[in-house]
Amino acid sequence: MVQKQTSAPIDAAENLAINALSYIAGEPDLLRRFLALTGLESTDIRKAAGEPGFLAGVLDFLMDHESALLTYATSIDRSPNEFVRARALLSSLN
């Protein structure tokens, strides 16, 4: 029997990624790098956020910038491992 994932963990992972995106948007250097790597314009972020895989990509980006990840995770009292788990969960949805 295949066990269906409940929406609570998915919702939590999505919320973590959305909040991470807000953090990135508030950090000019990170935002410039994020936009350069994704090829997005700042005006396209909201539309892109609805695309499959985008939120996992946000977490990938943050995890690739370890100092930013650690700073952000500490500021919201979360473990960096929570970002890793959220990224894995969001990636499994695609």
Image (cartoon, rainbow, N blue to C red):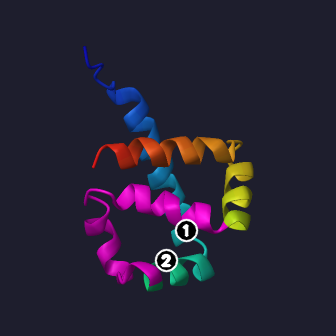
The furthest residue to the front: 1
Q: Are marks 2 and 1 in contact (CB under 8 Å)?
A: yes
Q: Residues within 10 Å of mark 1 (few under 14, many from 20)?
A: many
What is the number of the mark on residue 77? none
- The kind of residue on which mark 2 rests is Phe
> Disc 2 marks which residue?
34
Q: Residues within 10 Å of mark 2 (few under 14, many from 20)?
A: many
Q: Residue at the spot x=61%, y=74% of the render? A: 27
Between the C-alphas of marks 2 and 1, the distance is 8 Å
User: Does residue 77 belong to the magenta stretch?
Assistant: no
Q: Earlier in the sequence, mark 2 or mark 1?
A: 1
| Magenta residues, start to end | 37-65
> Disc 1 marks which residue?
24
- The kind of residue on which mark 1 rests is Ile
Q: Residue at the spot x=26%, y=56% of the render? A: 52
Residue 39, percent from left and from top: 36, 84
Residue 19, percent from left and from top: 51, 53
Please give left or right for residue 50 compared with residue 12 in the image.
Answer: left
Q: In front here: 82 or 42?
A: 82
| Vertical position of residue 40 compared to residue 11: above or below | below
Residue 54, percent from left and from top: 35, 61
Q: In front here: 26 or 6?
A: 6
